[in-house]
Amino acid sequence: MLEASFYTNQSEPNFLNRIISSLDRCVSFSWSVSFIKKAGLILLLPHIEKALSRGARGRILTSTYQNFTDIASLETFLELQRRYPHFECRLEDHSFEDDGFHTKGYLFEYGDSSFESIVGSSNITRFALLKNKEWDIGVVSSKEYSFFREILEEFNFLWNKVEPLARENVKTYEIALSYAIVSWDMDYSYDKETETLNPNFMQRQALKELQSTRNRNINKAMVIAATGSGKTYLAAFDARNFGARRLLFIVHKDTILTQALSTFSKVFGQSRTYGLYNGEYREMDKDFIFASNQMLSRHLELFAPDEFDYIIMDEVHHAAASTYQKIIDYFKPSFLLGLTATPDRMDGEDIYQMFGNNVPFDLRLRDALENHLIVPFHYYGIKDDLISYASDGSAEGNRLLVQSLSSSLHCSFISDEIKKHRPEGKLRCIGFCRNVEHAKQMAMQMMNLGYSTAYLTGSSSLGERIRIFQRLEDENDPLELVFAVDILNEGIDVPSINMVLFLRPTESSTIFIQQLGRGLRKYENKEYLTVLDFIANSYLRSVQIALALGSLSKSGVSDKLALSNMIRDNFSSLAIPGLEIHFEEKAQEEILRSIEKTNFNSISFLKADYQNLKSCLKLGPNEYPKHDVFLDQETGVDILHFTKKFPSYYDFLEKMGEDVPFFSKEEKEIIETIYEYLPLVHPEEYLIIKELLNGKKNENELLFALKDADHFKEDTFRYALKVLQDRFYYTRPSYHRTLVKKDGECYSLNFDFTNDSFKDWIVSLLDYGLARYQIEFYNVESKLKRSYPYTSFSSLLALNSENLFRMMGVFKVNQERVIYIDLRKDEQVLSHLKYKDRFLSPSSLQWES
């Protein structure tokens, strides 16, 4: 009997799931696949290992045809051969002379004497297994059928003609590849006719927004862009669009100056002259000057206030320094541009106000990944049964813990995992350690295992760090492992890093994302960053991993059920190109247990989260994060996380004992009412409140003042005016206050704001809400496929809110229909009301009414 099935990446099951299912139950597998990439292989590797671990025989035949298969995949197969005697790989390298090797066949034998052959178009690459239009046919048959015998005979013929995979033929292939690989092109296009460098897609979007800002006669703005996404190139392209004749580029570290100068010279070419102004050079006569803030602030009198028509301040989150403020106050450029990856100020102050709250473009980590501005990462959550954090805390406990972390047994375990996931080419790995002693011991133990190692700490000089990182980057230097303590949060990027080890229980999602981001900068031949995370029995650490990875979703995730589902699904719902997240089964169970026993809304959890955030921001005991800090999605912390248990962030800070301004009961209730609108689904309510802080206005005056605001809509404006006056009925908390009143034809705020501290807090909150809206809901598409509370949903559609509580099945909005469905039916629901509502597929819904 023959059973045939057709598989694509869209079928159910799809090709990848069918291969996984077959691996999970076969007694042997024989594959002949011409092209294999590690990025695709990792999708199958856990199941290959599981099959081999239970005794299944495995044979994989691949090729060097067209120099496509990567070294990292072959290294993986060498390691599998070492660990499993019943696994063998063979590498076809011109064994058939000029005939191309282009097979894609997957053969399986099962315990019931049945066989399966899957033959078609799919190689083992990420795109082939997840995205491409591929066709494959699977046939299940008994042994006596000639169909299977013919395929198996052909496989054995090829197998016997090809040499076994060994270190020698991998090395030969690697040498051949070194002559064949095309250099990475920085993702910028080069126009040969005009000899100009042109921006990539995301930079073109940013440039459009910057030009729009200037068209509205705004002369300063801040751009937020993830580390490694090309901020300096963006600044150079915008200066070129602006037509800058005399430009000043300011940095806080001399090490960045020459790199910035080089970038601008590539964009402007010989049309401008370039000079440095720092402790070593004083090249003031050049068109474009690249200056350190320290040196510039000491010699401002040598320049006229209007000397420069375009000024750029790099890493502007350092603008807290008095030197930066002095420079800002002195110069009067035609345009001032601030650049930062992390807009949170270390002293908690508001840098948004320094740029007039003008943030025309905000490119976060997810955006940078989606648009290929940085490399994706392949994350492996590895269960570490050798380490226990039960004794963590005391001095003796810490000493014993470091001993365990750096023991020879534990280091052998780490080494095995490195070999299993080792990227192609030279290993350039950073291991994040618990403390100095841990870093020292790790460097020593791993050196004993044959690695070339070094360690760096917060006390290592800048020169020493640069020297070590240059060695790590040098292809001819043997250094491959650097163990670090508290150094990669200081703005030092090492583009060549291709692996990161998390060797300590970092109980902060913020630090986790920051350290991860340091390895994502593009580098020649670097396809992705490999992340090995060793998960022991630290439940806080487990929860923070989930929160950190969940922060990469479009709206951030801190809900327990949503996080648990994402963990079970290996975060596939993130749907970021090239991103791979894999948890070992035991590691997954550990994290799910930790999430289950954690009350995300408990005071203790919120307090721990808050203290982690403060620690990451290096805030003192009398400092607290201002609203703008929470706009940095890379912190992995949402301000609304703190308002689930408290009516406002202000109330939360009060309960934490922070030194916040004193507000009256009425003022607190006003703040709490304004918080109700977060997250904004349209900006009009906040725009109206902000404008009325300047005094009362009639409707036409309000319209005139707001008509040019980003995303402003006149019809939503009129709806918002009614909402602010509580013209629509729906349940309100006891603290709710009516925010706007109407006297005659004029509107005014229905509360007193003569208290300057209170007004400042309101302005900061309004600016936060509007900036967050800009990030989250910048177009119609971004409002789809999200969840909303009732009140936010009515606001989204500008509905009369009283209709929300009539239990209506269908509600008409213009030409569209809103359908109300309780997908989760409580046990108490009467049987005749338990409609069979469910999703049949991602695009099909079954609904009864």
Image (cartoon, rainbow, N blue to C red):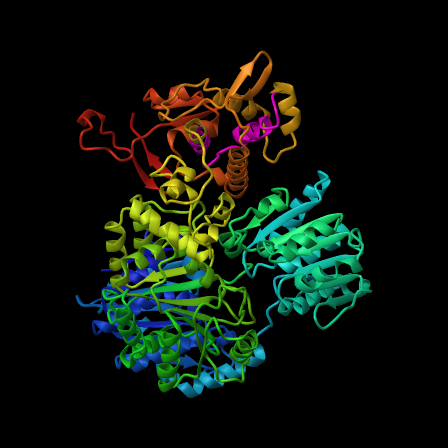
Q: Quadrant of the C terminus?
A: top left
Q: Which residues are magenta?
A: 670-696
Estimate the x, y position of residue 413 in percent, counting from the top left.
30, 76
The reply to whether the magenta stretch includes residue 684 is yes
Q: Viewer-proximal residue, 207 or 442?
A: 442
Q: Does any portion of residue 607 appear in the rendered image?
A: yes
Above or below, 790 against 471 in this view is: above
Q: Is residue 235 left or right of residue 20?
A: right
Q: Viewer-proximal residue, 646 or 190?
A: 646
Quarter of the figure with residue 307? bottom right
Estimate the x, y position of residue 692 in percent, counting from the top left.
58, 26
Residue at horizontal 24%, vertical 72%?
386
Residue at horizontal 47%, vertical 38%?
661
Q: Is residue 514 left or right of residue 841?
A: right
The reply to whether the magenta stretch includes residue 210 is no
Residue extending furthest toward the top: 744
Q: Quadrant of the N terminus?
A: bottom left
